[in-house]
Image (spheres, rainbow, N blue to C red):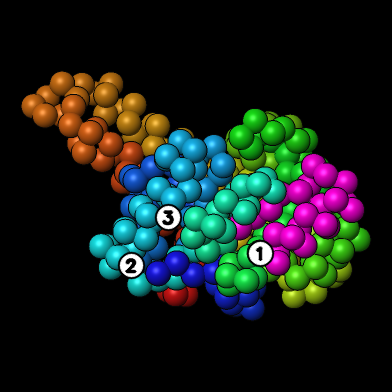
Amino acid sequence: MLVSAKEMVDKAREGKYAVGQFNINNLEWTKAILLTAEENKSPVILGVSEGAGKYMGGYHAVVGMVNGLIQDLNITVPVALHLDHGSYEGAFKVIEAGFSSVMFDGSHYDIAENIEKTKEVIKAANAKGISVEAEVGAIGGEEDGVVGGGEVADPAECKRIADLGVDILAAGIGNIHGVYPANWTGLRFDVLEEIKNSVGNMPLVLHGGTGIPDDMIAKAISLGVAKINVNTECQLVFADATRKYIEAGKDKQGKGFDPRKLLAPGFEAIKAKVKEKMVLFGSVNRA
């Protein structure tokens, strides 16, 4: 059964570790992440962008697949199904479809409109026990075609959004989505410290977890980050493993073209990457 992300991130913040949000794109992705979470007794958040939701056939299809896998694979660890960077309309759609957590990204609106829209999403989500993540200060890089520049959130604005009653807060601290460029200057821990001081016990989210050095991840967790999003890294290892399989000509041997065989190396690569992240974030044996 799906659960809200609130309890798992609150526990993570208190325990000084972070729960990974791993974005899903299809059945292989979802199954690999769920099995890895179960094997490592780690709570997990399955992230779905609006683009990925559409790709998988729609939000009801995603909910059906995730609930079915949890039941049939006997997954006992806490699992949240979370809309990643949701639009205002998208937030209401996933609440209706049966997601257990939602991120409303109002960071491109001015702060007054972001506040009004966030309030509406909180009201609808709270009625169904669904956790809400809000964003202040756009996260840089590309997210479904939206490009920002590694922006830095204003701690005062963070407080205004946090005070609305959101469960988790995403704030830009120089992090970006996708692969980090060579000239990236690193996370702004001075800003993270200020945000932490302004929002109190609110669990914070680090978007763009791919490619941030391990020591920076550890420091961010020590400063109140309790949820870290990983997407690109899983895509890269999946693509790499699939390429190697085909380049080795294995799809031409026997029934090597069978999708179950063709996608197996990528599936295993995702599992290995997710485990590596769970160990790094400290969420192993925390379920």
CA gap, disc 3 to disc 1? 18 Å
Q: For the residues carrying marks 1 and 2, which lies nearer the camera in this image?
A: 1
In the rendered structure, the answer to whether residue 63 lies left or right of residue 167 reads left
Q: Residues within 10 Å of mark 3 (few under 14, many from 20)?
A: some
Please report the bounds of the magenta region as a residue range: 102-123
Q: At x 44% / y 50%, what residue is drawn?
A: 60
C-beta proximity under 8 Å, tags 1 and 2:
no
Dot 3 corresponds to which residue?
63
- Residue underneath mark 1: 124
Classed neighbour count for the residue bearing mark 1: other residues with Cα under 10 Å, few (<14), some (14–19), many (≥20): some
Residue 276 image point, x, y percent = 44, 55
- Depth check: give the residue in front, 132 or 97: 97
Quadrant that contains the C terminus = bottom left
| Quadrant where the image shows the N terminus | bottom left
Q: Is residue 196 magenta?
A: no
Q: Amino acid at mark 2?
A: Ile
**Which residue occupies 76% across, 40% down?**
150
Instruction: Inspect this view and state whether residue 175 appears.
Output: no
Q: Secondary structure at mark 1?
A: helix
Question: Circle 2 sits on which residue?
Answer: 75
Where residue 17 appears, x then y in whole percent? 58, 69
